Image (cartoon, helix red, strand yellow):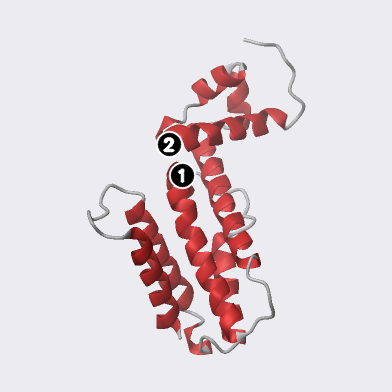
Amino acid sequence: MSDKPYHHGSLEQALVDTALAVVREFGIDALSLRDLARTIDVSPSATYRHFPSRDHLVMRVSQCSREALARSLLAARDGIIGSNTKRRSVERFEAIGHAYVQFAVSNPNVFEAAFTRSEVALERPDDPSAWSVLVDAIEQMITASAVPPSRRKDAPMIAWSGVHGISTILTSSIWPAGVNADHEVEAVISGISRSLR
């Protein structure tokens, strides 16, 4: 074990970064504070100063994973250039849906980690928040008259459930043989979009 000094806060970040790398490759169940300590060459007791239990680490990794998802949604939204017309607002909304599915398919272990339950309460809200990105996209559709204001309350959960559902099915082993994934993803996202209007 090394005596290499960590500046205040840098050990915590090293633990989080290493944990995220483990999750990307092996999944959330592979996380172990002792293994992380070994990997970054510090004593196990040093890890417990920052994460008193595995649940504390899972909470942080889950939050970092959701924030990575949110950043991918923001990038997709921001990729649709132009003023907030009816058409553009729908395109942004659908781009967010496609980005959600793409994130799940490209990063299945991180996607699973993003929604892993932890018994430890969050220390702060997600920043950015995938939920907020979705709510804002729906608000933009309402502003552009693409969605009626009466849908404001239920639209986010309808949209999230549909896109999360298809993402979960795609990343599991239950995808039906012979079914074209691209076609079904497009059908789900455009179907959600139409159902809100």
Residue placed most toward the observer, 37 or 68: 68
Give the image location of residue 134, x and y in percent: 54, 68
Question: What residue appears at the point 63 percent right and 60 percent down from the top-left corner?
Answer: 75
Label 2 SS: loop
Dividing the picture into quarters, in which one does residue 132 lie? bottom right
Give the image location of residue 178, x and y in percent: 23, 56
Residue with the mark numbered 1: 113
Mark 1 and mark 2: Cα distance apart in space: 7 Å
Question: What residue appears at the point 42 percent right and 82 percent down from the top-left corner?
Answer: 194
Q: Quadrant of the N terminus?
A: top right
Left or right of 189? Residue 93 is right
Vertical position of residue 8 compared to residue 160: above or below: above
Dividing the picture into quarters, in which one does residue 169 lie? bottom left
Residue placed most toward the observer, 147 or 3: 147
Label pair 1/2, CB-CB below 8 angstroms: yes
Q: Which residue is at the far left?
A: 177
Give the image location of residue 148, x and y in percent: 51, 89
One can see residue 191 in this view: yes
Question: What residue appears at the point 39 percent right and 57 percent down from the top-left corner?
Answer: 167
Residue with the mark numbered 2: 27
